[in-house]
Amino acid sequence: MPLNCLISYAYMNAKVLRMVQATQGSIRWMLDSGAFTAHEQGRPIEIDQYMQFLRDYGHLFWQTIALDVVGDAAATARNLNTMRAAGFNPMPVCTVDEDVEAVPAQLGSECRNLCVAGGVSEPLDLYATRLSQIRRLAGPDVWLHGLGFARGMRVAGTAVDSVDASSWMAGQRWGQLAWFQSAVGVRNIGWREALSRPWDKLPRGAQRAIVNMGLSPNHLKDSASLQRGAVSMLGVQSAFASLQYAAALEQRGIRFIFAVPSVDLTMCLLVAARHATQRAVPWAACRDDVDNARTIQTERLGEYAREASNNVDRLWRLT
């Protein structure tokens, strides 16, 4: 079961729920409360509705995260207490404004998992220092998860046990060609910029990604193919680079969790995983799956996810 994904409750609908159910045993799912997403969209998550969802479907998830309130440690603590009083044991969230000295009380006697907010917004030095302080207070046996924390290989120098990020979608979202660089992490270059440069002026990682994927200059000029829909050429390449990144972090004892917002974008990750080799995702091998993505989602998603997970497991052992 090598693939680890996080889905936000803010994105939950019938289609997403069917995907989570269909991929049990192939994807290890983590459920985020969706507080940050809802905050950005100006529509708060109702704690009673969240808890009802957990009663009905919480068994589908490896971990569930408590409903936090962005930037409000006191309100976050009240939500956590409400959930615990209702019989849940979610991962607490240490918000950016919380005094880290409160961490032991937040964990209590039974909780051995903790999320640390600020991975997206805080400067790395500040966030890494806070992680070290929390590790010291929580002890070595508590699992620390960095929310939205993807800072390349610098993540490996911190006290986290796992991180999640949506940056693996850079290809589909922003039209970027991605590659993995072992000392740094995932690197990107915009495809329009790549087209504007002479070949010998492109970063070597970008050159290797283009060649190993089997792309020609004509491929790079085909904007419709590059970014068409959720499962695009650049999307698949970006997902592949992050699979390599996940493998590198796993070797250092850190689990990378792919944050996914929809069934379509999860399909992009699965296409990359199913066709990955040690060197690349050959685009020619992906074309049939890309063209038939809708059919795969509706008719054989569970089988396809198993094939994708088994291939990644064979290549990188992302356990």
Image (cartoon, grey):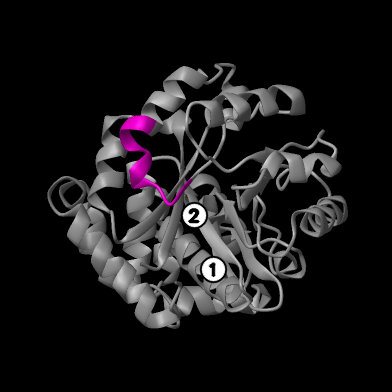
Report the disc number at residue 258. 2
Magenta part of the protein: which range? 55-63
- Which of the pair 32/216 is nearer the observer? 32
Q: Is residue 64 left or right of residue 158?
A: left
Of residues 286 and 97, the one drawn nearer to the viewer in this rendering: 97
Residue at (83, 43) in percent of width and height:
100
Q: Which disc, if any, is residue 246?
A: 1
Residue 221 coordinates in the image, percent (x, y): 44, 58
Q: Tell me, yes or no, if residue 272 can be seen here.
A: yes
Q: Nearer the viewer, residue 64 or 275?
A: 64
The structure residue drawn at horizontal position 30% and vertical position 73%, both measured from the top left corner, is 310
Mark 2: amino acid: Phe
Labels 1 & 2 near each other (Cβ < 8 A): yes
The amino acid at mark 1 is Ala
* Helix, strand or loop for disc 1: helix
Residue 198 falls in image quadrant: bottom right
Q: Quadrant of the C terminus?
A: bottom left
